[in-house]
Amino acid sequence: MEISTEVGSFLRWGNYQQILSLLKESGFTAYDFSMSWEGDSSELISADDYKEQAKNLRAYADSIGIVCNQTHAPLTRERLKEYEYGERGEALLIRAIEISGILGAKICVVHQLKNVTPEENAAFFKRLEPHAREAGVKIALENLWNWDHENDCAKIVACSGHEDFKRHLDLLPADVFVGCVDTSHAGMKGLETSAVEIIDTLGDRLQAMHLSDSNYKDDRHWLPFTMDYDFEEIIAALKRVQYQGDITFEMDKFFLNFPVELVPSVAKITAAVGAYFKKRLQEE
């Protein structure tokens, strides 16, 4: 069980090699490689030589003893309509899966289409299935949300709720498609679910996480034990389903609150929290 965090929160610290060195020195054993928006020329995924860059990053990670446990595919701006990817977007998803394989990631998180049925999402993901198999990477769907401005709360979309999330996964091959629980999303007001319900419902299809704390209303992505979530309940649920995935943080909103000089200290306390989760989950 690896202790990991996404690298997107650390881009102001330095280049990818410097970020991986920081994570290794802070106590992380793995990293979640963030692939950002289309058109960002600083991103590896947008580069013409993306394969060579990915190979070089993999070689550097191997040399310092840190692994890529999972990745996050880009949220493309090119959409046919709200929250759809478009032809260019799907091409970037395929590239993201290829990069994931080069980096050695077990899982690539790909946001499903938000405003369609489970059957329509299944058709979308099955177009990506051959590429995932070729790369040796699993694709994880994630519990998401939209915002209801009129009622000042989250709005239910595809996979927001535990039962709908399971219906999506039931339509897809279990050896390629898995679930990623985002704990911050799960507790948002208006979604009528929780991280515990998602964990219990997905069972062994749950193989990844975006771990963070929140306030039972917004999408805060804060350090666990600093806000309102009951992590004893979440740990108990993960143990019930015999969770075999990694401890992966997604806390961009938390990290970006600190001056850059404090990033190493914040990284160390986050890794320590990850080690605590790992210890608790491996207890008999």
Image (cartoon, rainbow, N blue to C red):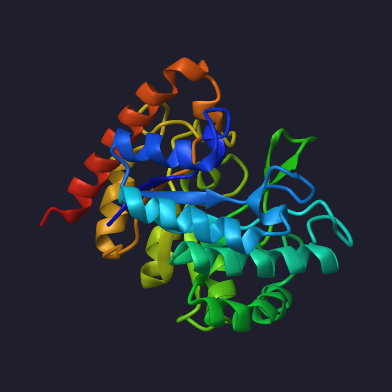
Location of the C terminus by quadrant is bottom left
As drawn, is 38 to the left or to the right of 182? right
Please tell me in which quadrant of the rendered image residue 14 appears. Answer: top right
Asked whether 41 or 225 is in front, the reply is 41
Asked whether 80 or 24 is in front, the reply is 24
Q: Position of residue 18 (x, y in %)?
A: 46, 36
Residue placed at 62% from the left, 51% from the top? Answer: 35
Q: Which residue in the rendered view is the most extreme toward the left?
A: 284
Residue placed at 48% from the left, 65% from the top? Answer: 107
Asked whether 232 or 266 is in front, the reply is 266
As drawn, is 167 to the left or to the right of 179? right
Residue placed at 19% from the left, 47% from the top? Answer: 280
In the displayed structure, 130 sits above or below 232; it is: below
In the displayed structure, 88 sits above or below 123; it is: above
Q: Position of residue 112 (x, y in %)?
A: 66, 64
Residue placed at 61% from the left, 79% from the top? Answer: 131
As drawn, is 41 to the left or to the right of 250? right
Would you say residue 105 is visible in this rendering?
no
Q: Which residue in the rendered view is the most extreme toward the right?
A: 80
Q: Position of residue 180 (x, y in %)?
A: 48, 59
Would you say residue 243 is visible in this rendering?
yes
Location of the N terminus by quadrant is bottom left
In the displayed structure, 8 sits above or below 2; it is: above
